[in-house]
Image: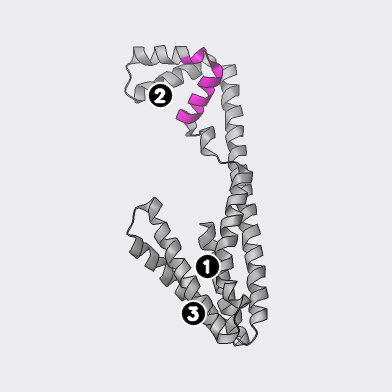
Amino acid sequence: YGANDGLGAVFGIVSGVAGYTGASDSHFVLVSGLAGMLASALSMGSGAFLATKSQREIYEAEIRREKREIEEDPQEEQEELSLFYQLKGFTEDESNVLATRMAEKPEQMLRTLAHEELGLSEDSFPNPVASAVSAMLSTAIGAFIPIIPFFFLQGIAAVLAAAIISLFAHFAVGAAKTLVTGRSWFSSGMEMTIVGAVEAVITYVLGA
């Protein structure tokens, strides 16, 4: 997601600025692309950090509430846990035995109730710093691709080279998604390539 976001955003910036300058000032396009890369990477990194931090804070607040309920009325929470086990297919007696044993370990009971009642698990929340670094680096890598030609080429040649490698990168990122989605790598790659091409045309025309 980060690579796709950075690639799409900066490809659009490069196309729009190239259209505005008539591709005559490659230095201006390069500076704009680098600024866009930096802004996209920092934005994605800070967004990922705040989002995962907020998720963890919500989890911790719910855990505190659940812990308070266990302390105030342990019997009711034990009965509640027994009902959850019954819904999973255990008999009433089996559920009561499991809930009783679980009640002997308050911390384990707390984690189990949080998972069963709220669908929350501590393992499902990534580290905010790791998420921020991952999002920032992947976005920066994707965003750097469209501006590479402007380090070496000038004018229309740089714009065409940027378009070619950017569309190829769109295809590669789209195809790579199939490792998770299980879709056809070709159709997924072409879908992202078409989206990138449409975006580039729109931004170039608006820039012009």
Q: Is residue 45 above or below residue 58?
A: below
Q: Which residues are magenta?
A: 102-117
Q: Are marks 1 and 3 in contact (CB under 8 Å)?
A: no
Residue 170 shows up from this direction: yes
SS of the residue under disc 2:
helix
Q: Position of residue 135 (x, y in %)?
A: 58, 53
Amino acid type, label 1: Gly
Q: Position of residue 180 (x, y in %)?
A: 40, 51
Residue 208 shows up from this direction: no
**Most foreground residue, 2 or 146:** 146
Residue of label 1: 8
- Residue at screen point 65% across, 53% down: 46
Magenta span main SS: helix
Q: Earlier in the sequence, mark 1 or mark 3?
A: 1
Numbered badge on residue 84: 2
Q: Position of residue 105 (x, y in %)?
A: 53, 15
The alpha-carbon separation of the residues under discs 2 and 1 comes to: 46 Å
Q: Is residue 122 above or below residue 203?
A: above
Q: Nearer the viewer, mark 2 or mark 3?
A: 3
Other-residue count near label 3 (Cα within 10 Å), few / some / many at <14 / 14–19 / ≥20: some
Q: Are marks 2 and 1 in contact (CB under 8 Å)?
A: no
Confirm whether the magenta stretch covers residue 62: no
- Residue at screen point 62% across, 50% down: 133
Q: Are marks 2 and 3 in contact (CB under 8 Å)?
A: no
Confirm whether the magenta stretch covers residue 111: yes
Amino acid type, label 2: Phe
Amino acid type, label 3: Val
Numbered badge on residue 201: 3
